[in-house]
Image (tube, grey):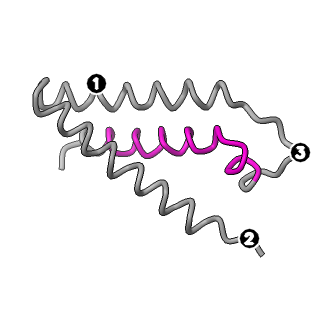
Amino acid sequence: MSWPLLAAAIALYLAWGCAALAMDRHWKALVGSAARHPVRRLRWLAAALAALAAGLCLWRDGAAFGLLLWSGLLCVSVWMVVLTLAWRDRRP
């Protein structure tokens, strides 16, 4: 595995994590309801990380396979975030 592919996978995982934290339910589960909720910043960060991952995939493999690779990583990373949220959402 090359470093651009690993960096793209991590960036997409973080992007979906930021997108999930932009929702009230996940934000309150993580930090509580008293904290300020930076929805707009989290959404911009998620978009920037997804664009960075797309750029890394396109740079690594070109337009045709890079987009296919990016969309595959997109699907895998969203499932990893879903599984992380399902595992970490166990509250007493």
Assign the C terminus to one quadrant of the image: bottom right
| Foreground of the two, 45 or 75 | 75
| Foreground of the two, 35 or 60 | 35
Q: The disc labelled 1 sits on which kind of residue? A: Gly
Q: Which residue is located at x 30 percent, y 28 percent?
A: 54
The disc at residue 20 is none
Up-down relation of residue 54 to residue 79 (above or below) = above
Up-down relation of residue 30 to residue 20 (above or below) = below
State the residue position of label 3.
Answer: 34
* Outermost residue, bottom side: 92
Give the mark nearest the N terminus, 3 or 1.
Answer: 3
Give the mark nearest the N terminus, 1 or 2.
Answer: 1
Give the mark nearest the N terminus, 3 or 2.
Answer: 3
Q: Which residue is located at x 10 percent, y 28 percent?
A: 64
State the residue position of label 2.
Answer: 91
Could you tell me how far apart the alpha carbons at marks 3 and 2 are, in whole angstroms? 17 Å
User: Is residue 19 within the magenta segment?
Assistant: yes
State the residue position of label 1.
Answer: 55
Taking 35 as reference, is 91 left or right? left
Up-down relation of residue 24 to residue 53 (above or below) = below
Percent coordinates x, y for residue 71 in the rendering: 26, 39
Q: Residues within 10 Å of mark 2 (few under 14, many from 20)?
A: few
Up-down relation of residue 63 to residue 82 (above or below) = above
Could you tell me how far apart the alpha carbons at marks 1 and 2 are, in whole angstroms? 38 Å
Q: Which residue is located at x 67 percent, y 71 percent?
A: 90
Q: Secondary structure at mark 1?
A: helix
**Magenta stretch, residue numbers:** 7-28
Percent coordinates x, y for residue 5 in the rendering: 24, 41
Select label 3 or label 1 by which is in front: 3
